[in-house]
Image: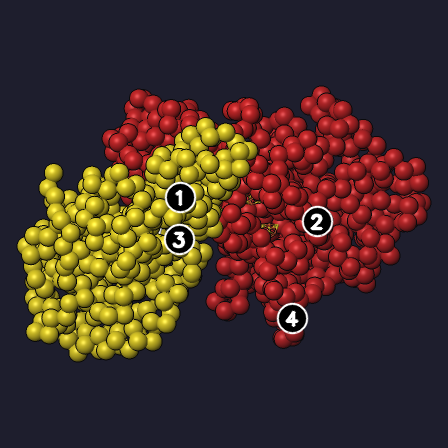
Chain colours: A yellow, B red
Amino acid sequence: MEQKHLKRVDLIFEWDEKNPPIQVLDETLQKTPDAIILEMIDSGLKGRGGAGFPTGLKWKFTRNEDSDIKYVICNADEGEPGTFKDREILDRVPEKIFTGMAICGYVIGAKEGYIYLRAEYNFLLKSLQQKLDKFNQQLKDRQIEFTIFLRSGSGAYVCGEESALFESMEGKRGEPRNKPPYPTVAGYNSKPTVINNVETLVYTCEICRMGADKFKALGTSDSRGSKVFSVSGDTTKPGIYELELGMPLKDFIDEFGDDDAKAVQVGGASGHCVPRKKFNDTIIGFEGIPTGGSMMIFNSSRSMYNVLHDYLEFFTEESCGQCTPCRVGCQQLLKGIEAVKKGERPPSYLEDLKKLTLTMKIAAKCGLGQSVANPFISIVDNFKEEIIY
Amino acid sequence: MSKYMVNLKINNIPISVEEGTTILDAAKRLNFHIPTLCNHPDLSVAGNCRVCVVEVKGARLLAASCATPVSEGMEVFTNSEKVRIARKHVVELLLSEHNADCTKCFKNGHCELQELASEYRYGDHIFIDLVPFKQKFLDISSPSITKDTSKCIRCQRCVRTCAELQAVSALAVVHKGSHQTISTFMDKPMNDVVCTNCGQCINRCPTGALYERNYIEDVWNAIYDPNKFVVVQTAPATRVAVGEDLGLEPGHRVTGKMVAALKKMGFNKILDTDFTADLTIMEEGTELLTRLKKALVDKDETVKLPMMTSCSPGWIKFQEHMFPDLLPNLSTCKSPQQMFGSLAKTYYADKINIKAENMVVVSIMPCTAKKFECNRPEMRDSGFKDVDYVLTTRELAMMIKQAGIEFDKLEDQHYDSILGESTGAAVIFGATGGVMEAALRTAYEIVTGSEVPFANLNIKPVRGMEGVKEASIKIKNAKPEWSFLEGVEMNVAVAHGLANAKKLMEAVSSGTANYHFIEIMGCPGGCIGGGGQPIPTSPEIRRKRAEAIYAEDMGMDIRKSHENPEVVEVYKDYLGHPCGHQSHELLHTHYVERKRY
Ligand SMILES: Cc1cc2nc3c(=O)[nH]c(=O)nc-3n(C[C@H](O)[C@H](O)[C@H](O)COP(=O)(O)O)c2cc1C
Ligand code: SF4
Ligand code: SF4
Ligand code: SF4
Ligand code: SF4
Ligand code: FES
């Protein structure tokens, strides 16, 4: 297998004075939409919001839909525990996001774009709006028929799930929808919609600036390019780092761990827990364990029971509550590990609970309920003693 | 536009269905039953309960069959191992947060969750009792609707019903995660919110979380009280539906058997709301003609047109909350139930020599809103509560069973007299468009002296299940006293279900509608689809009930309200003439503006 090593990259936050985003936009709009789509597909860029869907294809599908009205939406709901990279991007280089959105609008034929900003990031609203006004004016000056609007989110984690986000934007309760139809066919206001993560949009801007070749020179065949990581927990250097994809977790831990790391939770509460013995064989990327950016390091002072308990409390609280496997399943998992801990249920009950998470994984309505199996099984399997005793 | 056909296999059997068909419906065509809970034929798709999941070859996820359209080449398995495990988990999870005291539950024996549990009989449940949800959370504030959150499976059928069919949204999903529940604005009691008491949510709730406030014991007590004279009235739509709860197929007319059962149960007199339906036509028809005269001839600006019917108490409360500006457009006629009550405890009590205070009036209604209506403070024109107890069609069926009566073996019997005779015009009150049709049959004849110009008196344009129906009749050869109506095109509209009513009211409010007379029934299909009717309900079932209603009409000797001999007699004996003083006292009412929050 192709293997990379830890390498810092500086694309996202880099500011090229000679070629600022607005100039990238001007140059890119000289190309045809189809050429831009080809470039995106060629770059191998996959969504950075968690699901990892190829961005070029998403744009292509939406472009192919026949509709007068289409939308571009930037998912800035950043709610995954341990993730805080979008906030930094929104603060430091929002022009790149706007540019990515405008390019996408041009490609798919949308006249409106929206940024759905996590309610907790409302402190960014004012400065973002100022920069946005300027950008919108620049678009107007160029007679580009595209306007971006800011929307403040409604608070719940689940509103980051794309279809719940549309519901929320439409003024309804943020409950995920049935799929199909997918957003590319029926998204916001039931119109074809591209929804991309903040970071994804910045990379689209970067790919347009430097070309697909330079981007795909980074990373591996399954995981092209780099990614912004939010490093937290028992680390000597908490913070935000842009790293090349495809490194083994070992490299990462050598760089960021405190020499006592026993596990890393890759991908936040809904991600996987990797124990020390698997650091060497775990690749960070779509071929291994993908992450929306959250890397939480736990050292030997941490109780993995508490970690799992926290995650389950989070899901029990943050499930939208509409579907049975997730609403009741999360509660059962939480009560279940408590009962095992207290000795009210035998350790074998953990096996029943694991089976339950497998049902949740395939029968829950959205990604929230579907992903609870990830932390549950990886923590229970790797730290069984800590759960039981 | 012709739709594409899609080829797929379900449990290895090939089938070809129209594009857009759900897996659930396609499976049904092959007679594969897939259990469902949140799905309902009258509502949008929710896909939240997840009991209907099936396996699709090659797919990472199981598909909710109610929410997933078929696609070309799909291979579906409805009973694979994965499916069975997931279904078992889902049912067990639902039961783990459920207060399953079936033996005490009003829905015992009529509950979709119970049915599912009994179909699968999983035995010992592996999951932990989620105790907080089992604590009873009973809301009995409303005289119509009882809500028990401990029985709720959060399928949101009620929420969708109230929003989509009724445009009321009294019920909503609140909170998230483990706290997610169905509640009202600010968690207020049901009686203090915009709920119209229509009961449509009850008809679609799969469990015992919503049911009618029931008065069965009170009615038995009255029957067995030697000092009480218990009079019962039966609404038009009950006679085409009660059989469904007694083992008969939808669409069975059981008028005579129902009368026989009521006699056997011990009611003192079996009378008919159909009688007061005919009376309503006399009053409402006259009121309409009077309004037209005042508006068109006298140019009286205080007279409001279009006039709107007032026999559906769910609709009345809706209007009081939502369109108080249009209250003057409502006919002042009481509903047939309340006309019956006030006449029973005055005219009729006198006639049969019973003191009003010793008389108990019971109504059998397809409706839950009538339970609220009989408690309105205005409804005491006899000096007492005019109608004491309202039972739904469902409650009647339960009482018939409790009485040990073998319903289908009963010989037909006739209603008692007086207040028991009726016409075909009265029985069609039970279906949407029926009041309009009955009113036109009479009003047209009053004005012109001849019958409405429709074959067999059947005014087809106002019939059927279209949400909003319109018709117009040109008045020809008006009698001299109605000459101002000569040549006038009478424009009428009919709506059923409050979402349709809302559309019509918005048109009236904005001045884009030009009608003289509007019929509104609060429930989809009219009273045949009332909130007190047997469960389940579906477009198909309502269609069958409506057919039975029109068959009942065709089978009647008299089919015009003004020809009901008892109606004629009551006017002669007691009321004088329609909309006269006595009528005004007993048969008409007024409305109140209500807040929305
Ligand atoms: C419960 C849940 C929460 C999510 N929250 C976010 C979020 O905060 N930000 C985000 O970009 N994507 C989030 N997603 C993923 C989105 O649904 C969607 O896949 C993503 O926005 C697509 O953008 P991408 O293709 O650029 O990754 C979430 C998904 C789920 C199931
Ligand atoms: S999986 Fe959870 S969050 Fe997603 S729809 Fe179901 S209940 Fe809501
Ligand atoms: S709602 Fe159904 S399952 Fe629950 S107690 Fe009532 S009858 Fe039993
Ligand atoms: S009775 Fe009617 S108005 Fe009231 S909550 Fe139920 S559906 Fe809504
Ligand atoms: S009250 Fe009934 S219809 Fe409403 S969500 Fe609960 S179970 Fe479903
Ligand atoms: S019936 Fe299909 S999800 Fe509920």
Q: Does the closest atom of ligand 1 sit within 8 Å of the Cβ of label 1?
A: no
Q: Chain of mark 4?
A: B
- Quadrant (top left, top right, bottom left, bottom right) of the N terminus of chain B: top left
Gap between marks 2 and 4 measured at Cα = 40 Å
Query: Mark 3 or mark 4, which is nearer to you?
Result: 3
* Quarter of the picture holding the C terminus of chain B: bottom right
Badge 3 residue CB within 8 Å of ligand 2: yes
Q: Earlier in the sequence, mark 2 or mark 4?
A: 2
**Residue found at x 29% / y 24%:** B14
Marks 1 and 2: in contact by CB < 8 Å? Answer: no
Q: Nearer the viewer, mark 2 or mark 1?
A: 1
* Nearer the observer, A295 or B190: A295
Callout in the foreground (3, 1): 1
Identified by mark 4, the residue type is Val
State the separation of the CA atoms marked 2 and 1: 46 Å
Residue under numbered circle 4: B303
At 17% across and 47% down in the image, what residue appears?
A247
N-terminal of the pair, mark 3 or mark 1, is 3
Residue position for label 2: B140
Residue A256, numbered circle:
none
**Which chain letter matches label 3?**
A
Q: Secondary structure at mark 4?
A: loop
